[in-house]
Amino acid sequence: MEEKEISKAVIKRLPRYYRYLGDLMDEGCERVSSKELSERMHVTASQIRQDLNNFGGFGQQGYGYNVKYLYNEIGKILGMEKNYDVIIIGAGNLGSALSGYSDFARRGFKVTAIFDTDSAKIGRLIHGIKILSDRELEDYIKTNKPDIAALTLPRDAAADVAAHLVKWGIGAIWNFAPVDLRLPESVVVENIHLSDSLMRISYALKEKREKEMS
Amino acid sequence: MEEKEISKAVIKRLPRYYRYLGDLMDEGCERVSSKELSERMHVTASQIRQDLNNFGGFGQQGYGYNVKYLYNEIGKILGMEKNYDVIIIGAGNLGSALSGYSDFARRGFKVTAIFDTDSAKIGRLIHGIKILSDRELEDYIKTNKPDIAALTLPRDAAADVAAHLVKWGIGAIWNFAPVDLRLPESVVVENIHLSDSLMRISYALKEKREKEMS
DNA sequence: TAGATTGTTAATCGATTAACAATC
DNA sequence: TAGATTGTTAATCGATTAACAATC
């Protein structure tokens, strides 16, 4: 059914196109050419046209792209017309933060439950969402079938919990623990490795220091 | 002084090598070959050898790599022997979470201050760190010269605050706002675009649904 | 129609993988 | 020494950019 496999690099760029097109819409802009957009985004016009043509011809020769139409089409490609239920595993600082992040709700991601092992936390509310015991997790997943589980728990617990989540039927894991999860191909995994990101800053700062010295 | 420019792709992988080597050390492993490491990390042995050789020969023919030595060398490349002072701009959920994330301290990143505009928050403590007024920001930066500023504030405030931070002398920005900051080349910027990441999950889930239908 | 800009093919560039001589 | 494994060159692969004919 699918014509050709879309490269990972293209998919990684789609949310960024979506963001810029959203901005253009907010500015009341109706049409945009690949050249204009490329100047805004600091990428080549060629790349924009190549990328979009992976999914079909959204533009019109001599005119460019209709902003609203393109925004909607990319939204469809990204699956943004659907809403997603997200559960958070680990009611620590990061888990709490994610549960209250309004940006997600705007994009159709709704946090429906938070789980923790700490009996002192269970029953408390975070941003209006009740913290449940991890012993209720299996039941919850099988009954409510959430789409995504965000893993905001300690490193050592992550692999084991992830394996259980998958067994109980979760389809996607948003992993904030600093480990690479080994899960079946069919499970979607997105990693947010914050300390990797900090180390890249550290590297770049070191480079900068060395450059300034010479 | 620097021989050749190291590619972005290689640098992005370094923290991951560092993480795996740390794990090997914890397991008491003394030596590792590129082949063994490649199997653990699910990359090719060739890539590992290529990557490491960007920085010089860390291994020994017939033996492989000394884990501890290699760990330390990559640490040096990443600038991990230095400690970094981090300030957090925006005392919301995410800012609070980052200020309490113990993983960072372990890597030498220390949160020294948190700033916010909300007078109701100013003076309160988060994880033992006092929230200061954004009006003290300029003074604080010029006096204490923190290395990194984490931007955990609303989208619309980000660009403006970032520009000020740079003017006052900050060298690196860890940006959590869903915008691309336009700053001078000399400023290090690392973006954590959480909603972009969620959209990639959304895309992958959509693909999965479609695959299952056919 | 003339001008603009796409969709698409071809050329270039860079990154990954394979292969193997060097050497521990 | 023989076996193992690196460092490094060459081959392949994929992604980006350039160019331009098609067409609105």
Image (cartoon, coloured by chain):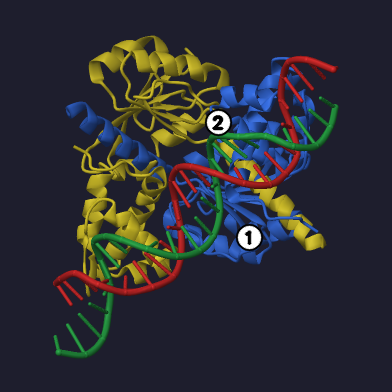
Chain colours: A blue, B yellow, C red, D green
Which quadrant would residue B125 be assigned to in this image?
top left
**10 Å crowding of disc 1: few (<14), some (14-19), many (20+):** some
Give how far across and how far down residue B182 sits, in percent.
47, 21
- Can residue B190 be seen? yes
Q: Residue furthest top?
A: B135
B17 or D8: nearer the viewer: D8
Give how far across and how far down residue A210 sits, in percent.
21, 33
Amino acid on which disc 1 is placed: Val
Residue designated by label 1: A187
Tell me: residue A150, above or below residue A58: below
Q: CA distance from mark 1 to mark 2?
A: 32 Å
Q: Chain of mark 1?
A: A
Give how far across and how far down residue B153 sits, in percent.
51, 23
Q: Quadrant of the N terminus of chain A?
A: bottom right
Q: Report whether A185 appears left or right of C18.
A: right
Give how far across and how far down residue B138 sits, in percent.
33, 11
Disc 1 secondary structure class:
loop
Disc 2 secondary structure class:
loop
Amino acid on which disc 2 is placed: Val
The residue at 62%/51% (across/down) is A7
Tell me: residue B160, above or below residue A135: above
The residue at 43%/35% (across/down) is B98
Residue designated by label 2: A43
**10 Å crowding of disc 2: few (<14), some (14-19), many (20+):** few
Q: Report whether D16 appears left or right of A33.
A: left
- Of circles 1 and 2, the one toward us is 2
The residue at 47%/58% (across/down) is A180
